[in-house]
Image (cartoon, rainbow, N blue to C red):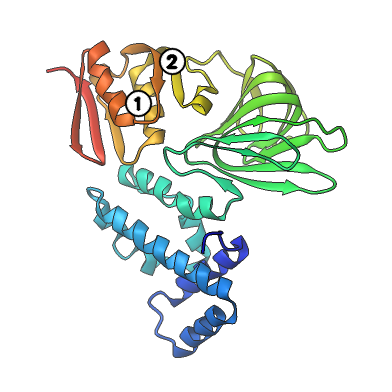
Amino acid sequence: MSAAPDPRVVKQAIQWTLRLNGNADAELHSACQHWRQADPEHEAAWRRVQTLNSELAASYQAVPGAHAVLENTTQRLQRRQALKLLSTFALGASALWLAREVAPWQRWLADYSTATGERRRFTLADGSLLQLNTDSAVNLRFDARQRLLILERGEMLVSAARDVARPLRVRNRDGLFEALGTRFVLRQDERSTRLSVEDGSVAIAPRVRGQTTAIAEAGQTYAINGDSALLAERSNMDSSAWADGLIVTRDMRLADFLAEIGRYRYGHLHCDASVADLRLSGVFRLDDTDKLLALLPQTLPVQVEKRTDWWVTVSARG
């Protein structure tokens, strides 16, 4: 089936999967079978959920130390916790990687999404341009009264088309952002959201305040945490270069640079404390992060050690 099933049907398939896991109740299995046979789309969603579940499980087993974390995880889940697991883990360093890898469920259910290392662009029905960075998910709420984008995770670049009757707004965990004829980047991290305006201006209404507290103008960057919106210092990284497949840095700490590169690849990318404060500037391509890392020893006194495909360390040159 080439088209993705209806998100509501996918959610139903996920719920059936979680209910059946480890449950030998014949009536429950019969009810699931009846649901699958009731509509071809039900069966298609069921098969895709099972396939993705198997692929994720196989991928996790390839990660060093992951087996102990994963073993019997599904069996221990309560149904009410299951969907939460699909979007977040807090079980240490290995689980931080796992948290990113369960995101396919969230991305699959979103209207627009990207996988780790992927960047995509979409032209919306109103003519606005939406670009998504790595590991991002956005839902769309366009109708006769509103144009609303919901940033579920990751980073987006929006070039808003003009519509006086329906201003384009973006909502996320930390607030509501209204485009005032503009082009801007919105990035949602673990603790806050970063807004960088390239053209026009954006009205910011932090979630807790519920009303506009600041107007971000072109060239400005704001940090929003749900309760406040504060003007941020100029970043040492171009906020929108990723849309062109680049990372552009200016006197950036190596540790921060590697943390950024880590967003575009699987596994763990570690920076040894002895080289964390080294600085670098330049223009780097994001398409192949292994080649990018291989360039570092040419400009800095470091070595790149690849223990496995999932574990890479950058340390002082021996």
Callout 2 environment at 10 Å: few (<14), some (14 to 19), or many (20+)?
A: many
Give the quadrant of residue 248. Answer: top left
Callout 1 environment at 10 Å: few (<14), some (14 to 19), or many (20+)?
A: some
Question: Which residue shows up at 31% across the image and 45% down it?
Answer: 94
Distance, label 2 to label 1, CA atoms, is 12 Å
Q: Label 1's element?
A: helix
- Of the numbered discs in the image, which one, if any, rests on residue 249? 2
Q: Is residue 280 visible?
A: yes
Residue 273 lies left or right of residue 242; in this view the side is left
The residue furthest bottom is 27
Identity of the amino acid at label 1? Leu
Say above or below: 34 vs 133.
below
Residue 210, image x and y in percent?
A: 76, 37
Question: Which residue shows up at 69% across the image and 37% down it?
Answer: 170
Residue 209 lies left or right of residue 25; in this view the side is right
Residue denoted by label 1: 258
Give 28 or 157, whichever is nearer the viewer: 157
Q: Is residue 226 visible?
A: no
Q: Label 2's element?
A: strand
Give the quadrant of residue 305. Answer: top left
CB within 8 Å, label 2 to label 1: no
Residue 64 lies left or right of residue 249; in this view the side is left
